[in-house]
Image (cartoon, rainbow, N blue to C red):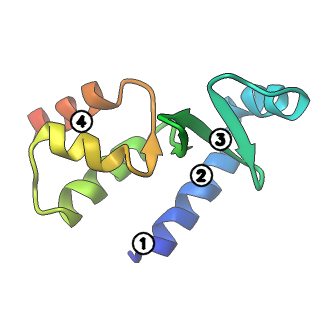
């Protein structure tokens, strides 16, 4: 799967996810300290930048994709690579779980 296609799939999954509706509604009404809407997608404000907000079952797809693309780095390195583009709750803990299932 090409990088562009993967990001497109993530965008579609985010739009289809019903759990994000409440957050989107809030963001459409007012500015938020932690999240921001851009082009109908939700991003996490992180270290003076924006990271694509990933949620649900797609989190494992992001971890797996980065793990495979970057040559099976360690847990911390994979977490750091993910945090260049993506954000999700308990990211490091979920990466750790992924590694222990390998």
Identify the residue under disc 4: 95
Contact, mark 2 vs mark 3 (Cβ under 8 Å) = yes
Query: Against 68, is 32 above or below?
Result: above
Q: Residue at x 76, y 56 (%)?
A: 39
**In-image side of 102 versus 78 (left or right):** left
- Image position, residue 57 (x, y; %): 44, 41
Label total for image: 4
User: Residue at label 3?
Assistant: 17
Q: Quadrant of residue 10?
A: bottom right
Distance, label 4 to label 3, CA atoms, is 22 Å
What is the CA distance from the residue labelled 3 to the residue labelled 1? 21 Å
Q: Secondary structure at mark 1?
A: helix
Position in image of residue 53 (x %, y %): 55, 41
* Residue tagged 1: 3
**Of marks 1 and 4, which one's residue comes earlier in the chain?**
1
Residue marked by disc 2: 13
Distance of mark 2 from mark 1, alpha carbons?
15 Å
């Amino acid at each position: 799967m090409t990088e562009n296609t993967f990001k497109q799939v993530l965008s579609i999954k985010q739009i289809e996810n019903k759990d994000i509706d409440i957050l989107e509604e809030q963001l459409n009404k007012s500015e938020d300290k932690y999240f921001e809407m851009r082009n109908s997608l939700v991003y996490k404000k992180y270290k003076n930048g924006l990271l694509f907000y990933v949620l649900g079952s797609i989190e494992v797809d992001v971890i797996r994709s980065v793990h495979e693309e970057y040559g099976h780095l360690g847990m911390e390195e994979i977490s750091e690579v993910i945090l260049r583009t993506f954000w999700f709750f308990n990211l490091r803990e979920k990466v750790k779980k992924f590694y222990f299932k390998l």
